[in-house]
Image: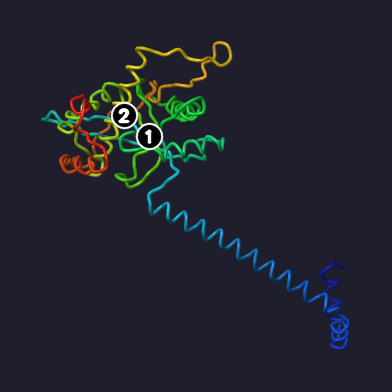
Amino acid sequence: MNLYDQFIQWAGSLNAQQVADWLRNLDWNRVVPEITGKFIGFLLGFGASWFLLFRKHLNALDRLRRGDSDDVLFQAHFLTPVPGSDKFVLVFRNLMPSTTVNDLYDNPAARKIVRELAEITTLRKPVLRTEGTLGFEVLNDAYNHIAGHLAITPFARETWLFAMTCEDRQVVRRKCVRCFLVRPAELERFANWRWCRENVVCEQPWHWYRIVALHQLATVWQEEEQAALNPAAKKQGMPLVDKHATHRRIRALSAGIFANEKPVGRTAEIDWPAQEWELKKLGLDLNAGPQAAG
C-alpha cells in the first residue's frame, strides 16, 4: 500500500470527536503566529514578484514606445542609378537576421560598453566612439561576426567599409546599433553634401536621414584616412603586439555581397531645405564649412 492509500485510509478512520479533540489540544498560541507569519511572508513575496514583473513589463513597453531597441542590424548600402538621369537611389538591405547586443557579445562588460557608446552618439557623430583596447575588442567582435557570416556567400568578393553606428532618436523612429557596410567609392561620394542633396533619392521619404548619416560617416572616414598618412607612434603590449589604444572605427572588409539590388516601388525626392532647417535647429548645419562642398 502506498502513502496515498495509507493517508486515505487514515482520514477515513477519523470521526468528528477525534478531530475536535485534536483541534482542542493544539497549542494555538504557537500555531496562529506561525501560520500568520508564513501567510504574510507569502503575500509579501508574491506582491514583490508581481511588482518586479509588472515593472519590467512597463519598462519594456516604455522602451518600445520610445524606439529603444537592443537589436544589432548589419546593413549593406548601394547607390543604384536612376535610368535616364544623373541621380542615384540609396538602397540598403539587411545582410542577415537581426541579432541582439546580448547575443553578439557574451561578455557582460562588452554589452555595457556597446549600450553606453550607443547612448552618446549624436546627429553630428553617429559612429560609435570606440576607444582604447576595450573599444577595439567591441568593434572587432562585430566586424568578425559579419565577416564570418559573409565568408560562405557565393558572390564575388570586393572591398567594403564597415562601421558601427547608432542614429539619433531625434530623427529616427527606432534607435538601435546599425553596422553599415558601403563600398569605398560610394562612401567617397557621400563626403560631398552638395552632391548628396542634388543627386541622391530614397526608396522611402523617411530614409532621408540615412543620407545624412552616410555623409557624416564619410567625413569620419576622410579624417581617418588623413590621420593614416601621418601615423603616431603606438604603444605595444607584449612584444610585437599592438594594444590598439587608437584604431580605425571604419574598417575595410573583403566580402561577397549581392550587389544588384533594385529599388522597391517609386523613389522619393527629399525636400532638403525643410529637412536641413530641422537639422540646423538640432545643431547640425550641413551647409556650413568644408563639408558642404566636399
Mark 1: few/some/many CA within 10 Å (<14, 14-19, 20+): many
Location of mark 1 (residue): 165
Image point (17%, 33%), residue name: 197
Q: Position of residue 188 (x, y in %)?
A: 26, 23
Instruction: Identify the residue at the far left of this view.
Output: 84
- Mark 1 and mark 2 lie on one chain; the one further toward the N terminus is 1
Instruction: Judge whether 120 appears above or below 158 on screen.
Output: below
> As shown in the figure, which amino acid type bears the numbered disc 1?
Thr
Query: Callout 2, which amino acid?
Result: Leu
Near-viewer residue (213 or 103): 213
Q: Dot 2: within a 10 Å radius of its alpha carbon, few (fewer than 14), some, or many (20 or more) residues?
A: many
Badge 1 marks a residue whose secondary structure is: strand
* Res. 164 image quadrant: top left
Q: Are marks 1 and 2 in contact (CB under 8 Å)?
A: yes
Picture layout, residue 78 above or below residue 26: above
**Residue 179 picture location, percent across and down:** 39, 33
On the image, the x and y values in percent for residue 190 come to: 24, 27
Which of the 4 image quarters holds residue 256? top left
Residue under label 2, please give it: 217
Q: Is residue 50 left or right of residue 121?
A: right
